Image (tube, rainbow, N blue to C red):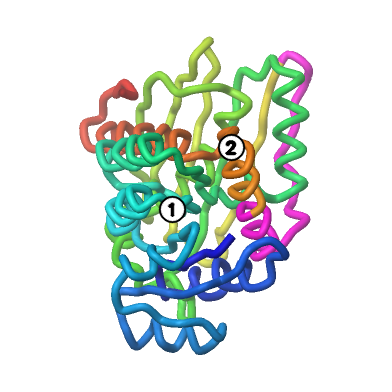
Amino acid sequence: MRFGVLGTGHWAAVTQAAGLSTHPSATLAGVWGRSPDKAADMADRYGVPAYADVDALFNDVDAVAIALPPDVQAPLAVRAAQAGKHLLLDKPLALDPAAADEVVAAARAAGVATVVFFTNRFVPSIDAFLRENAAIGGWYAAHGTMYTSIYQPGNPYAESVWRKERGGLWDLGPHALSVVLPLLGNVVDVSAAEGPRDTAHLLLRHEGGAASTLSLTLDAAPDATSFGFSYFGEHGATTLPEWDATQVEAFGSAVSALLDAATTGTPHPCDAAFGAQVVHILSAAERARHTSTIVAVQ
């Protein structure tokens, strides 16, 4: 399958393009970006054409891998789907539930496969953990903490405009939800509180009565970074395992998942519909942060 990469930033270069260039069943066929100079540099790095016109790229590929800000990604994903291209998307899918739903509708109307690269879900140790524990069932609580510190010298995401505006809720929230929803189920409503250093504290109520709490920030004190998820159920307690793959290897697994979905017609669990579900939850959490009320997920 011939892929075009949309995006020229750090994540696009070191993960998407790198993963596609080494995948045994995919070909990196071209690059498009909002900066022609950066697109040319990245295309030269991987020995592929740089496209000035994104529609021209669509014409030459079977699928696109998108690594762009969420509000830029969503309308381009709609255009790519309408052009009949399979979609390997980044998270969050969009910054607005309506925009996320438009991607889902466009993909369904065109009959194209979709996968959203929720990174954890394509790490073998975590994928196996979630599958095994979902089969066990009986999980009624979870707690997750993601305290990262991107605003340090040399961090490639420190100047990301959308991350500065939306914070850890929107950047880290998709990661967190991707490893909580499979065990606790869909979210019914959300309450939230602000904390120091732009920390979002969420309390989620799930279908069936389970509850989870999440604490998320991109601006933790450098010596206070933390990552961990704990789960509690009728059969005991457990924690999310450590990674056993690199980010590029995880992306390669996502490419394989898209190829399989395109071939079989069977949606992947992390398809655009799941990505839209996550956007709806994050939107409700955003409203809860600003209103100090419990907000239903619509």
Q: Identify whether 228 is placed above or below 298.
A: below
Q: Which mark is residue 85?
A: 1
> Magenta stretch containing residue 5, yes or no?
no
Please provide percent x and percent y for residue 144. Answer: 57, 39
Please provide percent x and percent y for residue 67. Answer: 43, 63
Q: Are marks 1 and 2 in contact (CB under 8 Å)?
A: no
Q: Residues within 10 Å of mark 1 (few under 14, many from 20)?
A: many
Dot 1 amino acid type: Lys
* Residue at the image position 49 percent from the left and 22 percent from the top: 186
The stretch in magenta equals: 234-255
Considering depth in this image, is 281 or 89 the residue closer to the camera? 89
Q: Residues within 10 Å of mark 2 (few under 14, many from 20)?
A: some
Can residue 228 be seen here? no
Can residue 151 be seen here? yes
Dot 2 amino acid type: His
> Magenta stretch containing residue 244, yes or no?
yes
Q: Identify whether 28 is placed above or below 129.
A: below
Mark 2 lies on residue: 268
Count all numbered tags in the image, as a single digit.
2
* Residue at the image position 47 percent from the left and 67 percent from the top: 4
Considering depth in this image, is 161 or 91 the residue closer to the camera? 91
Considering depth in this image, is 230 or 274 the residue closer to the camera? 274
Residue at disc 1, secondary structure:
loop
**Image position of 12 (left or right of 39):** right
Mark 1–mark 2 distance (CA, rounded to whole Å): 16 Å
* Residue at the image position 43 percent from the left and 60 percent from the top: 66
**Image position of 117 (left or right of 125):** left
Quadrant in which residue 7 is drawn: bottom left
